[in-house]
Amino acid sequence: MMREFAPAFRGGLPLGTPGDDGSGIRLGAAAGGATAFLDRVSVWRFLSPPSALLTGVLVGRDGRRVCDESRYGAAIGAAMMAGHGGQAWLLADHATLAQARRQLRGPALWFQRIQGAYLLTAGRVSAATPGGAAVRAGIDPAGLTATLAEYNAAAAAGRPDPAGKPAGLVRAQDRPPFSLIDCSVRPRLAYPAPMLTLGGLLVAEDTGQVRRADGGVVPGLYAAGRTAVGLCSHSYVSGLSLADCVFSGRRAGRHAAATPAA
């Protein structure tokens, strides 16, 4: 189903259980149910910890800014996928990397330490100049140089960040050497990109019954949770699947219990 409906998202880490294989959606579709948003996937790309990396500059292959680096991981992932094909690199100077290394020695979960250590070592390339680092990473040197100049100029003058990053996280990246950390969505044990699908069966919003393409319902068939189109099919924030599952499950159960058997 990923190959058919969301091929651009292949390479991320499926988030779920062995039973989350689309069989519920396929069952409902085989019974006449309509589907929607099967191409919608939420991919999470968190740039911290260590938090010092949030002062860096996230760019695509063209060297242009992806988004505000402090945004929620799902928002960063969406920006990477929408305009950059899931490819992005975080530019950080020597001072930022030094601070990030110090922060790794502080409180952190075990997998965050592994991730941070990978990003600060094998996950990056470096050079004496931003353009040199760009060449090594395979991105456009001119685009990166222009993006960094704009970012640093705003930081030096105390102007708002061009991408809207909070002022407390804006720091000029101007101390060589410069590193580009590969944040792209691709299979990596040390830095996976968790993702989950957001589409499913269309349901009647007042009952949870599965709808057909003509707007009618499939008698006796209900869908809930991520098997159904729901609250977070347009946009996802962590925890919404739990709330959506509880709400839509209760809705379907109540209607089924109150409906006389055929």
Image (cartoon, rainbow, N blue to C red):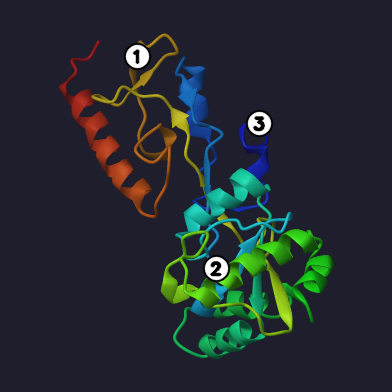
Marks 3, 1: nearer the viewer: 3
Earlier along the polypeptide chain: callout 2 or callout 1? 2
Marks 3, 2: nearer the viewer: 2
Marks 3 and 1 close (CB-CB < 8 Å) = no
On the rendered structure, is 153 left or right of 121? left
Could you say which is closer to the camera, residue 34 or residue 75? 75
Label 1: which secondary element: strand
Residue picked out by circle 2: 47
Mark 3 vs mark 1, CA separation in Å:
26 Å
Say which residue appears at 71% left-offset and 59% top-offset. 63
Could you say which is closer to the camera, residue 86 or residue 197? 86
Residue picked out by circle 3: 4
Label 2: which secondary element: loop
Q: Is residue 104 above or below residue 243?
A: below
Q: In the rendered structure, which amino acid carries the disc numbered 1? A: Val
Mark 2 vs mark 1, CA separation in Å:
44 Å
Farthest residue toward the left?
258
Earlier along the polypeptide chain: callout 3 or callout 1? 3
Say which residue appears at 35% left-offset and 14% top-offset. 217
Marks 3 and 2 close (CB-CB < 8 Å) = no
Residue 233 lies, in percent from the top left, at: 42, 37
Q: In the rendered structure, which amino acid carries the disc numbered 3? A: Glu
The picture quadrant where one finds residue 145 is bottom right
Q: In the rendered structure, which amino acid carries the disc numbered 2? A: Leu
Quadrant of the drawing holding the N terminus: top right
